[in-house]
Image (tube, helix red, strand yellow):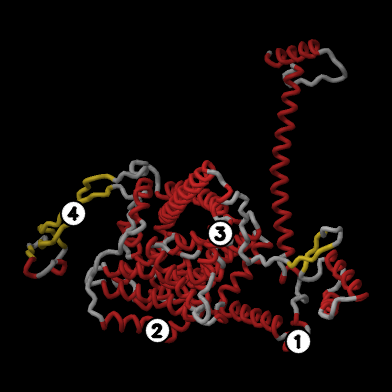
Amino acid sequence: MVGLATWRQREERRKRPFHGTRGVEELRDRREDCFHGVGPFHCGPGREGGWEEEEEEDPWDSPELQDGAAAWSELDTKGKVLRVVTSTGKGLLLLGFLYMFICSLDILSSAFQLVGGKAAGDIFTEGSVLSNPLAGLVVGVLVTLLVQSSSTSSSIVVSMVSSGLLQVQMAVPVIMGTNIGTSVTNTLVAMTQAGDRNKFRRAFAGATVHDFFNWLSVLVLLPLEVASGYMYKLTKLLVDSFNIQSGEEAPDLLHVITDPLTKAIIELDKSVISDIATGDPAARNKSLILKWCKTFTNVTLRNETVPGPENCTSPALCWCSPDLCYTLRNISETYNIQKCNHIFVNVDLSDLVVGLILLALSLLVLCSCLVLIVKLLNSVLKGQVAVVIKKVLNTDFPFPFGWVTGYIAILVGAGMTFIVQSSSVFTSAITPLVGIGVISIERAYPLSLGSNIGTTTTAILAAMAAPGDTLANALQIALIHFLFNMSGIILWYPIPFTRIPIRLAKALGNITAEYRWFAGVYIISCFFLLPLLVFGLSLAGWKVLVGVGVPIVALLIIIIIVNVLQARRPRCLPLVLRSWDFLPLWAHSLEPWDRVVAVVAAKCCCCCRCCQTAQGEEEEEEEEEEEKGGGGYVLENGDDWEKKREEKDDVLKATQL
């Protein structure tokens, strides 16, 4: 094989004028490089039997979607009518599938709450754990993963702060964790495009750029907040300086359209999770499935017996006898008026079973809608339509206003998220568009940042509807969430050099395109194993967490520094550390792991095929025996069948006797 150094020498020769004998030699060298796969070119047969060089395509470039249909001017009247009807039908189908996709995300969130909602409430009851900022961060991640809704987990935090069970300072890391947990949905959506390598590369990078932004923001801002408390102090100053009155609830914009379908399937009593988190023992026996949609609560003033005078509502409303004490107290009684209309209202199943059913169905609908949406987009976005859309979405403003484009994209992402009231829905919707190349990852990044801002504005409006005694705390938590995302944008967006999440997402996209199984490893490790490990160490105490965590973090920092120096300043390193070749291959390459995965997958497939083959052979043998009529008795050496059958009957009679 032609070495890389030899190829570089030839590249130096190619920079010189191309003429005479040298031209023949260089043509031979280029052809040899093509055959050996060296250099930035791939070769194919030319028109005249020779070889032509073609520059390799950048996998991150948006592919050109070819339009094989005839031009509009070439169509007759019938063809034009058919084209309009077809395009209209595709547009309506696209809207229908998008509607089902959004509804399936809502049902998926309800399913996760049914499966893990009470466990999420129990996690919040560990007050001693939440005093650890790192554990609070992990709790926010785990709870949001369990309920698949940052709004739900944030409302739980607000309830705990309002009830005095959690201080605002302790709630700051939890809010940061909810930001991380909500980004797993679009990462799972990207997995549905694993069939095409380049689409999967772009889709997974477009989804994980949101993950990397959240993780990097937490790595910088959490230690800064623990050391200085700047977010708590700044939001406290804002809340105290404005005399904010309670407002109306956050507007239900998209839910007005989706609720008729989702509420016909399932309705949840989300207050149960908050009650469990705040320590209400009666809430543990309640079902999350809402049975009665209309209730009436009557408050009456009644006499009630209490153990002693200290339990009376006031000394003026207390009467004691030698045996008992009576006091006047407001008693609330709730009367059920009308049952809900969803399909699980009269089903006698546990929350776990209903949650698993909805989880399977919602995932099936979500994946099916996503595949159909991608196919329709590939069909619709062709030719001039694709060119126009790509230019509108990916083109920057002319100089010197090009820098404004990204900030407009942030505003668009914030506005769209405010409309749909869910960052998961918006980022999951743009993920397939990144996969098919309609939106570049450079444009998807500011859209995702705007989505983070949009979901916090909804939380601020929701906090404005809180009662007067809890308004300050609820609003401060919502403002902390907003300030956290704004601080992250200031860190990782204004200067192009600091847009590290894009580079990290592209690197991860290249890895997962080559080794697709690594996408599952990434999701399980970052969103489940790592949070569970930190949470378990936090339960063991600070000493265990520091003793285990500090060496691991130090090792990771050393590896990152060595990798950066290997790429940029290898001369600064000793000869041994200029590459990782001194380590076993499995320790610095995914190739051995890929072979293991391939062998395991092959064995599983082989086992399935062997079972099917064995079953097929047994069925064939049974069919052959039935055709021979021997009832399972095989003829040997041309024996007479009637004679063998009589002998068999005699043996059976003797056995019965």
* Whole-number angstrom distance, CA of label 2 to CA of label 1: 42 Å
Residue 465 — which label? Answer: none
| Residue 486 x, y percent position in the rendering | 43, 77
For the residue labelled by badge 2, is the local secondary structure a helix, a strand or a loop? Answer: loop
| Residue that extends furthest to the bottom in the rendered view of this protein | 572
Q: For label 2, count other residues whose C-alpha is less than 10 Å away and answer few (under 14), some (14-19) or many (20+).
A: some
Element type where label 1 sits in the image: loop
Q: Where is mark 2, residue-wise? A: 229
Quarter that holds the C terminus? top right
Report how far apart the C-alphas of labels 1 and 3 lie in the structure: 52 Å
Residue 129 seen in the current view? no
* Residue in the image at 70% along x and 12% along y: 653
Q: Earlier in the sequence, mark 3 or mark 2?
A: 2
Amino acid found under the numbered disc labelled 3: Ala
Mark 4 is on which residue type?
Thr
**Residue type marked 2:** Gly
**Which tag is nearer the camera, tag 3 or tag 4?**
3
Pointer 3 residue: 386
Q: Rounded to the nearest whole Å, what is the CA distance between mark 4 and mark 1?
A: 76 Å
The answer to whether 4 is drawn above or below residue 600 in the figure is: below
Looking at the picture, which amino acid does disc 1 mark?
Answer: Pro
Residue indicated by mark 1: 574
The disc label shown at residue 297, or none: 4
Measure the alpha-carbon separation of dots 3 and 4: 57 Å
